């Protein structure tokens, strides 16, 4: 067998990652994208000595000299300019989030006070230094790096952008992707298939997988006609950064994709991987540098993922290969390190990496993977029964209960 | 202390989950939503005896009688109506995905054939029964349940919807949510704050958190003015299923929210939870049954989450309380069972559940949680440095390296 191993295939895919540049978007639309600038503190945080409990602000000197009763001189509200305590034997009511009044250096929370007739009595023996005061610049100094370039933006980052006034942010541009199905047996979702037909489904599964990466992919169906494929794919290569195919990459008489791609000058980087399902995966690239069309001047090359057409093959190949390619392309330093424990013995003879469909469940902090018995790579319905693929290595046939293997978990729930 | 414990607070919140009904959406827009119908197989899967390898289809009887050379009678392509092998001493080329030709019951893949001058010679000693044939109905029978109601829809389900022709699907309706900030110290993201002001950020963090649940929340800012709050919140209660507040729920002079909600007939279910950060959390509901306004006829009640205004408090409370409330409301049976291992000793004295900000990393299949030292609940920038909150129980002060605790992981990467 001259098939390439999964590890090598993945390396080739990831080594062909590509930078698609940078765009600026509204900060509220940036969640899930990759940040392409460093975010700095525009001022100290907190930006002023900040009251952190509701109560009274006093001069600690008065307290330390034994004074416990303080007349209330005024109220320092959050959002008001700093007031000044005129008489340091008095106090100022002060609210959480307010600026600490001038001439005060401690805040006593209401829980420790008795307030009667405009006088607060403090029921406390000793003060801590700067009690209940969040001092200016304690968290971050103006100019401090808050978020590094190449961070995957989450709601936490959205809050920081707002805080420092970044109403727009630079993010990695997304690749322009089209997902193409082929196969004369396919009809549309809204149609009633004849006995020998089935409905298109893989393109929609992949549209959804890419949506999770915030990529809006286009879709197209092309019939199994060599000439039509040549014309249409040539045009797609000129207009898309990434072409993803589903089907027509195996040994069948109408599996025109590898030949057509070759004829169109797409360089094959590998074809067929030592894995099941998804073995006939074809991967290649086309450099556009020497093309004359001005329309592609800015597109240096197109990448082609041609996945086999079986639903489970397409699905596992998309998350195993396209996702890491995408993460590398946009600059995210992410390696899927998730693992799970095989919950029963399993036997798989062929010398192929086996992506075993499993159901996951957490038992005392351990992630257990229970095999779902599929009927081969065409069994789409099993994808709905399972949660993940357990990746079993190709160098042996017996896998023992309790062993730990990498997983591709496609059902993670976001908090 | 008469504070409520975290566990009890969560129970009250979840017990006030509410069904918002069902809507029908395009199947391609349903990813991330909760399915509200059972999905059945509309036909057998595969719908016909399906060729699963490219090669030739033969009659096994001929093979078992010793025949190894077969003349090729024709080609059965995927997407073509079933052909008939006229002479069972011949064979038919047959492609993956095609209907098995009549009068054949085995498929020999090209890898095991020598084809010359229209004759295929089989290099194989024995056939398996129905070799390379995926028999009709092996995966699922017509009428079989494929996906159960109340499933969180993932790309795997999108593929099944397409396969069975569900171009629209019933999903749980989302609650209508508004997120309200208060506080005179807040200015807009695009503005330059004065020394005593800061920018609004919590509402945007929460908008992003809710976006992950596919909820598009409205937002509003109201100044700390009791009369204005009364008028505006009364109107919000009539128009939203859920009101989320950030700020003005503590003991400050301008913390009007609890009083205003009380005056508007919102029943307090609890106020103040034994936790840090996020202790002043106020939770309540308002039943609309007896109201006269016809506009609210269909809204049976409103739920109010009034979170404290510190960025980290708001953040942790939103994922700790709002998310489970939402999941229960839409019928998803999900409990966050994620845990991580504390990587160093930690001490926290107050008798409160402590949501410790931690950085996560996977070491040999174990999820390790390393504390990030924050400066209190106002320290938003730490959210960007951390990955999760480790939930340390309130009944002790010493937490030892190696102990396992629940986590709220807000940075999970989807495959």
Image (cartoon, coloured by chain):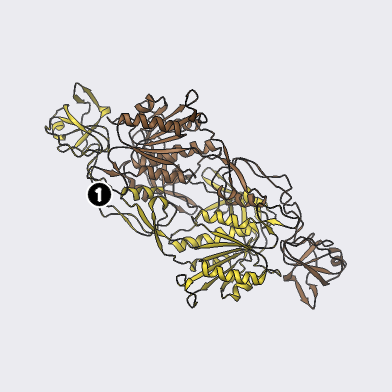
Chain colours: A brown, B yellow
* Left-right relation of A223 to A132: left
Q: Position of residue B412 (x, y in %)?
A: 52, 48
Disc 1: CA contacts within 10 A as few (<14), some (14-19) or many (>=20) = some
* Residue B143, above or below A257: below
**Camera-side residue: A402 or A66?**
A66
Res. A389 visible in picture: yes
**Viewer-closest of B197 and A235:** A235
- The x, y position of residue A105, in whole percent, is 81, 61
| Image position of B119 (left or right of B325) | left
What residue is drawn where x is 40% and y is 39%? A179
In the rendered structure, the answer to whether residue A353 lies left or right of residue A157 reads: left
Instruction: Give how far across and how far down residue B57 sits, in percent.
Output: 20, 33
Q: Quadrant of the N terminus of chain B?
A: bottom right
- Extreme front residue here? A294
Q: Residue at x 87, y 69 (%)?
A: A89
Vertical placement of A18 versus B348: above or below? above
Q: Residue under circle 1? A: B44
């Amino acid at each position: 067998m001259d098939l390439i191993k999964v590890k090598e295939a993945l390396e080739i895919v990831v080594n062909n990652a590509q930078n698609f540049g940078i765009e600026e978007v509204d900060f509220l639309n940036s969640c899930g994208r990759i940040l392409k600038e460093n975010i700095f503190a525009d001022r100290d945080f907190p930006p002023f000595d900040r009251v952190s409990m509701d109560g009274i602000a006093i001069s600690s000197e008065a307290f330390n000299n034994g004074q416990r009763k303080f007349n209330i001189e005024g109220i320092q509200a959050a959002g008001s300019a700093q007031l000044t305590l005129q008489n340091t034997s008095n106090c100022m009511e002060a609210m959480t989030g307010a600026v600490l009044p001038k001439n005060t250096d401690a805040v006593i929370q209401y829980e420790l006070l008795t307030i009667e007739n405009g006088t607060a009595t403090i029921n406390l023996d000793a003060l801590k230094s700067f009690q209940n005061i969040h001092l200016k610049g304690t968290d971050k100094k103006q100019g401090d790096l808050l978020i590094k370039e190449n961070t995957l933006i989450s709601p936490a980052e959205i809050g920081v952008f707002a805080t420092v006034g970044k109403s727009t942010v630079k993010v990695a541009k997304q690749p322009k992707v089209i997902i193409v199905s082929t196969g004369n047996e396919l009809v549309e979702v809204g149609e009633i298939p004849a006995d020998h037909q089935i409905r298109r489904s893989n393109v929609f599964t992949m549209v959804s997988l890419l949506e999770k990466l915030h990529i809006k992919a286009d879709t197209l169906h092309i019939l199994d006609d060599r000439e039509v494929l040549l014309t249409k794919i040539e045009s797609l290569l000129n207009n898309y950064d990434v072409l993803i195919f589903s089907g027509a990459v195996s040994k069948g008489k109408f599996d025109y994709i590898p030949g057509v791609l070759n004829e169109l000058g797409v360089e094959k980087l590998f074809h067929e991987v030592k894995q099941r399902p998804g073995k006939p995966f074809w991967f290649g690239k086309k450099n556009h540098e020497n093309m004359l069309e001005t329309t592609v001047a800015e597109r240096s090359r197109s990448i082609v993922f041609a996945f086999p057409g079986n639903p489970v093959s397409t699905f596992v190949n998309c998350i195993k290969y396209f996702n890491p390619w995408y993460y590398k392309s946009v600059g995210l330093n992410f390696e899927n390190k998730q693992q799970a424990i095989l919950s029963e013995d399993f036997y798989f003879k062929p010398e192929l990496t086996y992506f075993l469909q499993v159901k996951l469940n957490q038992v005392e902090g351990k992630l257990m993977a229970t095999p779902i018995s599929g009927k081969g790579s065409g069994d789409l319905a099993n994808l709905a029964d399972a949660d993940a693929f357990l990746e079993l290595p190709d160098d042996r046939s017996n896998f023992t209960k309790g062993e730990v293997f990498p997983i591709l978990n496609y059902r993670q729930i976001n908090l």
